[in-house]
Image: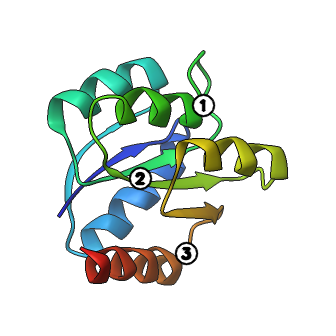
């Protein structure tokens, strides 16, 4: 199983990288900018994409998911510090496996990954 992280906060990204490593998942890469993330994800084709909903550039996490799902169908896990219901509804139109509020706990991420493994 492979995973790609799209997170614009360097500290959050590092924490997520450590969690992914502890879970024994192969990290394909990380990216802070949505537009670049789309290119890298389409090139690397990870099984799972861990996406921050709010990014600093013109592409937010939902836009990233929309773009990549036009080409292939990875498992999408959204993470967000903003539990705004409108973001969740927009994300639902694209589809996702889980919508995890920040701060992401190792236990929650582990449960989500285990759920993905049991459905594949």
Q: Residue at x 60, y 15 (%)?
A: 58
Question: x%, y% of residue 53?
Answer: 62, 42
Label 1 crowd (10 A; few <14 / some 14-19 / many >=20): some
Residue contact at pointers 2 and 3, CB within 8 angstroms: no
Give the residue number, with chain letter if any, for mark 2: 14
Give the residue number, with chain letter if any, for mark 1: 55
Closer to the camera in the image, 47 or 33: 47
Q: Secondary structure at mark 3?
A: loop
Residue contact at pointers 2 and 1, CB within 8 angstroms: no
Q: Residue at x 82, y 44 (%)?
A: 86
**118 to the left or right of 56:** left
Q: Of label 1 and label 3, which has the lower sequence position? A: 1
| Quarter occupied by residue 2 | bottom left
Quadrant where the N terminus lies? bottom left
- Colouring style: rainbow
Closer to the camera in the image, 6 or 14: 6
Q: Is residue 34 visible?
A: yes
Closer to the camera in the image, 71 or 99: 71
Give the residue number, with chain letter if any, for mark 3: 105
Cα distance in 3D space between marks 2 and 3: 13 Å
């Amino acid at each position: 199983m492979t995973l790609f992280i799209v997170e614009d906060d360097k500290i959050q990204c590092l924490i997520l990288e450590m969690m992914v490593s502890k879970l024994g998942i192969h990290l394909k890469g990380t990216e802070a900018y949505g537009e670049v993330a789309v290119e890298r994800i389409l090139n690397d084709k990870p099984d799972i994409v861990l996406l921050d909903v709010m990014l600093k550039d013109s592409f937010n996490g939902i836009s990233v998911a929309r773009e990549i799902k036009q080409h292939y169908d990875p498992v999408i896990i959204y993470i967000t510090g903003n539990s705004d219901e409108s973001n969740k509804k927009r994300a639902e139109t694209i589809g996702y496996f889980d919508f995890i509020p920040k701060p992401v706990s190792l236990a929650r991420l582990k449960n989500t990954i285990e759920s993905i493994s049991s459905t594949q």
